[in-house]
Structure formats: C-alpha cells, structure tokens
Image: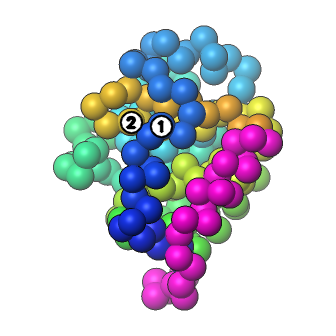
Amino acid sequence: MFVLPDESRQLFKDPFGTLHRDIGTVLPELAGRTIYSVGDVVTHSLQQNGITPAIAVVDGQTMRSPCIKMPEIAGPCIHVKNPPGTITDELVSALTHAVDHTPVTILVDGEEDLAVIPLVIAAPLSSIVIYGQPNEGVVLRIVDDQAKTAARRLLTQFTKTESPIPHN
C-alpha cells in the first residue's frame, strides 16, 4: 500500500492534466478515445452525455458527502478498499485487471481520488483519464509517455507500506 504523507499532500492540489470548467468543453476531445473516469459526478456526467467509460472508479461520495448523482454501473463491478490518502495494492490490482477487461466499474470503499495516478500508469497510450476537480471543473489527462512518467514521479512522494487490508 502507498500512503501519502501529510507533507506531500500539497503536490496533489493542482490538476494532473488540463482543467476544463465543465464537461461540455471536453466532449469533443473524447471522440474515438478510450475513456477512464475517476469520480462519481464526472462519471455520471459522461453517462448523461452518452459516454460509458471503459473503467469508472467511484466511491458513492462527492466532496466527502453522499453523491446524489450516482452513475450507472457498467460491466462487472469490482469492490475494493482504499482508505483516504492511500493507494492500496487492491486498488492497483483492480485497475490493472480492469484495463484488459472493460467495461468495468470499480466501487471503492474509502476514497477514489488518488486512483488517477495508478490508472494513468496502467492505461494504454492515447487513452484519456478524466476526473473531477472539486469546485473547479473536470481534468482531462491524455495518457502518453510524459503522463506515465509524471504519474510515476508522483508515486515516489508516497511511502510504501505493507497493506493491512486483506485482498479478496
């Protein structure tokens, strides 16, 4: 399990991609691409616009409150545990598996925010990872070598520990 130390949290406040004020502005960029989404509201918004993400990572929460815009479950649903401020081995394993078995919904017990990092690493080149930036809009990250390198660099800010969460 990777744990984000308090002193590194500020590195994750800035968007990890291009920030757009609303989902409508990113729709033209999604055409013909494999889309992966992280977050309930952005996943719901994509679905409302006729786009089913190949992988949707959701936790039933938005800004730490129950989400009233729950997305539909697409494909099999994989349940994982991922406490706030962590990236569990269970989450990484689910993402890696899901990339080759789409469509998949990953339902996180805990927090899904940091799933963007391992998802960019696992996703194929030219795909898109999209997630919500609270109170600002949506962030679009085209997966290329630069994105994968940046994600791996961000992962070095975490402390690697033994996972106390049993793998199912």
The residue depicted at 40 percent of the width and 45 percent of the height is 13
Are the residues flagged by discs 2 and 1 in contact, CB closer than 8 Å? yes
Q: Secondary structure at mark 1?
A: loop
Q: Residue at x 60, y 38 (%)?
A: 129
Within 10 angstroms of label 1, few (less than 14), some, or many (20 or more) residues?
A: some
Which quarter of the rendering shows the N terminus?
A: bottom right
> The disc labelled 1 sits on which kind of residue?
Pro
Which quadrant, please, contains the C terminus?
bottom right
In this rendering, the answer to whether 64 lies above or below 43 is below
Q: What's under tag 2, amino acid-wise?
A: Gln
Q: In which quadrant of the rendered view does residue 24 lie?
A: top left
In the rendered image, residue 126 lying in the magenta stretch gets the answer: no
Residue 97 vs residue 72, the one in the foreground: 97
Residue at which label 1 appears: 15
Please name the residue shown 47% across and 73% down the image. 3
The reply to whether the magenta stretch includes residue 155 is: yes
Hey, which quadrant is residue 6 in on the image? Answer: bottom left
Q: Is residue 50 visible?
A: yes
| Horizontal side, residue 5 vs residue 2: left or right | left
Distance of label 2 from label 1 (alpha carbons) = 7 Å
Give the numbered dot on residue 153. Answer: none
Scheme of image coloration: rainbow
Judged from the image, the secondary structure of the residue bearing numbered disc 2 is: strand
Q: Position of residue 120 (x, y in %)?
A: 66, 48
Numbered circle sitting on residue 133: 2
Residue name at image x 57 percent, y 79 percent: 160
Residue 59, x across and y down, in percent: 37, 54
**Magenta stretch, residue numbers:** 145-168
Q: Of the two numbered discs 2 and 1 on the same chain, state the one appearing first in sequence.
A: 1
Horizontal and vertical percent for residue 94?
61, 63
On screen, residue 5 above or below 62? below
